[in-house]
Image (cartoon, rainbow, N blue to C red):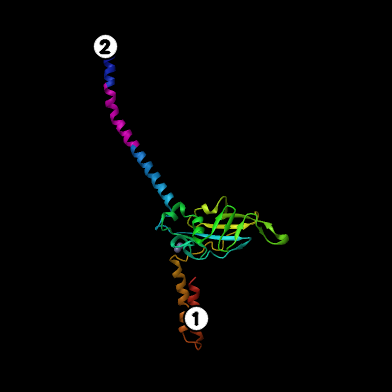
Amino acid sequence: MAKSSRVKRRAKVRSPRRNRGPVLWYVLTALVVVVGVIAIVAFRDDAQAEAPRANRDHWHAAFGVNVCGTWLPNAPEFHSAADNANVTAGVHSHGDGLIHIHPYVSAEAGDNATVGRFLEYGGWSADRDSFEVWDGQVHRTGDECGEGDDAREAVVRWEVNGEPHEGDISDYKPADGDVIALALLPEDEEIGEPPSAGNTPVDLAPQPGVTAPAESAPAPTASSVPDASASTSSTAPAGTSTSTP
Ligand SMILES: [Zn+2]
Ligand SMILES: [Zn+2]
């Protein structure tokens, strides 16, 4: 009896001493893991929730509107809200067929940088079964395309990068480089690719580089001898014009 109780007492005394090290180690490890997970989740949430970030990101998405097989001209240029000229629109149009997204305030940044924001600033609107844009007409599901015997019932549809999407296009938040097509077309007709797909944004750096050779090319021809020397006029422009593209 005495021996067994002594053994028990020893065991009781020993166990906490032995465990103190590992317990501390487990706690520290768990702490590192928890802090790490929180940091990763917070960072990811931050990146997803805020992009495109106000005064930092500058995105572009091609946007075309197809009415009964005809693409409307590019959205007209605008830089302020249609209903309030004092509101600078960070989601706007340079008339190049692209939605320019470089938000200035949170109301047009992140999840607020939607197609609907663009349309609203431009003075237009769209929902799941109708839209009214810069042709000034309301197009609705149930409208007809074609005339007389060729008339067919059309529906409001939209695609992103060639993929059909459901729901309200106004809620869609474009990603940088998206190609977005809104259409009123019969169900079985292909929307196709908007003409502005692949356009270079007019407000990006490459633009001056593209126009510079075009401006310098005519200069030598104009300044060179009018018509006497056929050799210089034929050789000089040929070299400059073919090398530029
Ligand atoms: Zn831009
Ligand atoms: Zn711009």
Q: Main secondary structure of the magenta part?
A: helix
- Identify which residue is drawn at 28% across, 14% down: 5
Q: Name the residue type under label 2.
A: Ala
Q: Is residue 65 magenta?
A: no
Residue highlighted by disc 2:
2
User: Which one is nearer the viewer's eye here, 147 or 182?
Assistant: 147
Marks 1/2: CA–CA distance: 116 Å
Residue numbers of the magenta segment: 13-30
User: Which one is nearer the viewer's eye here, 78 or 183?
Assistant: 78
User: Which one is nearer the viewer's eye here, 134 or 213?
Assistant: 134
Ligand 1 lies in quarter: bottom left
Vertical relation: 117 (above or below) 227? above
Q: Is any part of residue 181 visible from this angle?
A: yes
Q: Name the residue type under label 1.
A: Thr
Give x and y (percent) for residue 227: 51, 87
Secondary-structure class at tag 2:
helix
Q: Residues within 10 Å of mark 1 (few under 14, many from 20)?
A: few
Residue highlighted by disc 1:
235
Task: Give the label on residue 84, or none.
Answer: none
- Identify which residue is drawn at 56% across, 58% down: 181
Asked if residue 146 lies left or right of residue 171, the reply is right
